[in-house]
C-alpha cells in the first residue's frame, strides 16, 4: 500500500539531494518519478529542481491554486512515485490532495521540506504534513557547535532577521542551520 511521507530537515540538510537520489533510483529501474516544486521558489528558475552541488532535474512548479490530485490524475502517463520539493510552501488543501493521490491512486508521495521558518514556527504545508503523513522522517544536519541543527536563522546584510514575512524568497537573504541554543545566542544581539 502506498504511503505519504514527510521528510523534513533544516536548511542545507540535503533534502533535495535525497529527492534527486530517489528519482534517479526509480529511473534506473525504468519507473516514472514525477517531481513537483513550489513556484514560490524561483531561486533556480521555473520547472527545475536544483541542488547546491549542481545536479538538477525538470519538474512541475505548482502554484498555491493548483489541485495536485487533479494534476496527477490527469497525467497521460501515471507516475510510480511523486516527489515534492519545498513542501512547506504547500497549502493545507494541497497536502489533502496528495493524501488523495496516495489513497485513491495508490501512488506513494514523498514530501521534502522545512519544518519551521526563521521564527521557529511551522509552515502551513509542514503543519498539514505533520498531521497527515503516514511516515515522518528527519534528515539531520549539524550546527557549528556539533549539536543537531533544528533552527533556520535568516540573514540579511550579514545580520540576523528577527521579524518579517514567513515566505521571502529570491531576495538577498540567506539561511544558517543552527541548534536551538546557538540560534538564541544569535537572536540576542
Ligand atoms: Zn549550536
Image (cartoon, grey):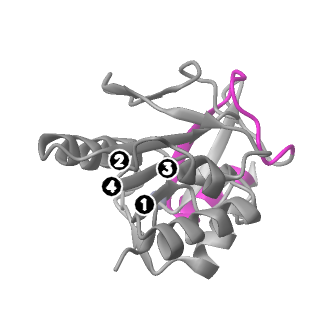
Spatial separation of the CA atoms under disc 2 and disc 3: 8 Å
Quadrant of the image occupied by residue 171: top right
Spatial separation of the CA atoms under disc 2 and disc 4: 14 Å
The residue that label 4 is drawn on is: 80
The residue that label 1 is drawn on is: 110
Question: Magenta residues, as a range?
Answer: 164-187
Dot 2, how many residues are within 10 Å of its Cα: few (below 14), some (14-19), or many (20+)?
Answer: many
First in residue order: circle 1 vs circle 3: 3
Spatial separation of the CA atoms under disc 1 and disc 3: 6 Å
Mark seen at residue 84: 3
Residue 118: image location, x then y, percent: 69, 52
Query: In the depicted view, which residue is nearer to us: 150 or 9?
Result: 9
Report the residue at 47% width, 32% height from top: 59
Name, please, the residue furthest toward the front: 76
First in residue order: circle 2 vs circle 3: 2
Marks 1 and 3 close (CB-CB < 8 Å): yes
Residue 149 drawn in magenta: no
Report the residue at 20% width, 41% height from top: 27
Amino acid at each position: 500500500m502506498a504511503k505519504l511521507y514527510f521528510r523534513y530537515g533544516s536548511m542545507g540538510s540535503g533534502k533535495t539531494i535525497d529527492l534527486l537520489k530517489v528519482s534517479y533510483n526509480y529511473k534506473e529501474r525504468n519507473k516514472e518519478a514525477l517531481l513537483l516544486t513550489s513556484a514560490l521558489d524561483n531561486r533556480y528558475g521555473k520547472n527545475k529542481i536544483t541542488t547546491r552541488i549542481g545536479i538538477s532535474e525538470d519538474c512541475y512548479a505548482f502554484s498555491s491554486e493548483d489541485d495536485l490530485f487533479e494534476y496527477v490524475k490527469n497525467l497521460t502517463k501515471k507516475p510510480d512515485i511523486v516527489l515534492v520539493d519545498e513542501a512547506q510552501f504547500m497549502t493545507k488543501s494541497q497536502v489533502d490532495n496528495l493524501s488523495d493521490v496516495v489513497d485513491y491512486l495508490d501512488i506513494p508521495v514523498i514530501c521534502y521540506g522545512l519544518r519551521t521558518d526563521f521564527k521557529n514556527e511551522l509552515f502551513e504545508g509542514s503543519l498539514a504534513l505533520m498531521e497527515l503523513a503516514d511516515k515522518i522522517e528527519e534528515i539531520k544536519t549539524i550546527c557549528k557547535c556539533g549539536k543537531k541543527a533544528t533552527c533556520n536563522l535568516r540573514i540579511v546584510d550579514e545580520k540576523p532577521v528577527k521579524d518579517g514575512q514567513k515566505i521571502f524568497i529570491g531576495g538577498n537573504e540567506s539561511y544558517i542551520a543552527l541548534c536551538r541554543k546557538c540560534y538564541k545566542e544569535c537572536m540576542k544581539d
